[in-house]
Image: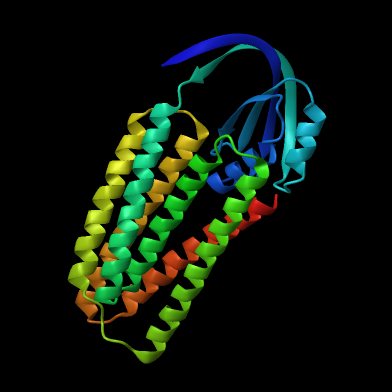
Amino acid sequence: MAFKTSEQMDKSTFEITKMDCPSEETLIRMKLDSFSNIKNLDFDLEKRRLTVYHDGLTNEIEKSIDDLKLNSKRIGTEKITTDLNLDNKKGERQLLWTVLLINFGFFAVESITGLISKSMGLVADSLDMLADALVYGLSLYAVGRTGQAKKNVARLSGYFQMILAIVGFIEVIRRFVSADNPPDYTTMIIVSILALIGNGICLYLLQRTKSNEAHMKASMIFTSNDVIINMGVILAGGLVYFFNSNKPDLIIGTIVFVIVTRGALRILKLSRA
């Protein structure tokens, strides 16, 4: 259920050239969390623009955004009378819980089967699933909590992801050096196809909402990236079979560990803002 309310407020538009992914969006949201006069934030990641609906304190808001060093510039501020949609978020929260549980479930499945089949591609993909589940969990946990509580959870999530990624890198190097036997390509392909189906369901559910909310769009971006990674692991499984080598599996594992590491660094940056 949704209803509208009309009110007069300020509308400030910012161009933020280094805002190109959901991590920067979350960084900005947490930075502006302390401003009680902000009514709504409208993110456009493709155009790298942020529109802030607020009551006064324009210079203070601009300074807070500038402090993030994302190469931001205020394009302009105007007085407007607008209708803001005040939506019931229960449906979105339930959807995010569904996506979180699917991601965490496949983390468990892929990590176990990855260890059994000796596939670093599956293990790495499981960590990427876990990273997404942590991001969704952080978003749900953060609702109604203080800015410091959000930062503490973000910091713990970032360090946890970083430790897992480092352990993964060490194992990849060990397997490169020791020339282990190829992993079970059949398990790689079957489990990755199941994960691909799971992510496809998540993407369908997210797109079906037709939500223009930034956090829902961010969730779609995360899930779209997961689909690409799943396809990469499937391809690696086929190459393991064709070449009878563990190198394709180690290569895809390394690529995914790099993705997980980048996500961890962004979360840690977020926790220091």
* Residue 21 in view in this figure: no
Residue 136 position, x and y percent, is 46, 45
In the depicted view, which residue is nearer to us: 158 or 206?
158
Which residue is nearer to you in this view: 116 or 15? 116
Where is residue 168? Give x, y as percent.
Answer: 44, 74
Image quadrant in which you'd find residue 57: top right
Residue 227 image point, x, y percent: 33, 52
Residue in the image at 57% along x and 58% along y: 156
Where on the picture, by quarter, is residue 157?
bottom right
Residue found 22% across the figure and 55% down from its top: 194
Of 98 and 191, nearer the camera is 98
Quick one: 118 or 73, which is closer to the camera?
Answer: 118
Q: Residue 2 at x, y = what percent?
A: 45, 15
Q: Say which quadrant the N terminus sits in.
A: top left
In the displayed structure, does residue 77 sit left or right of residue 244? Answer: right
Position of residue 139 in the picture relative to residue 13 (left or right): left
What residue is rendered at 31% in x and 87% in y? Answer: 180
| Residue 8 visible in image | yes
Q: Quadrant of residue 6?
A: top right
Q: How is the image coloured?
A: rainbow
Q: Which residue does the image show at 35% across and 73% down from the upper left?
A: 120
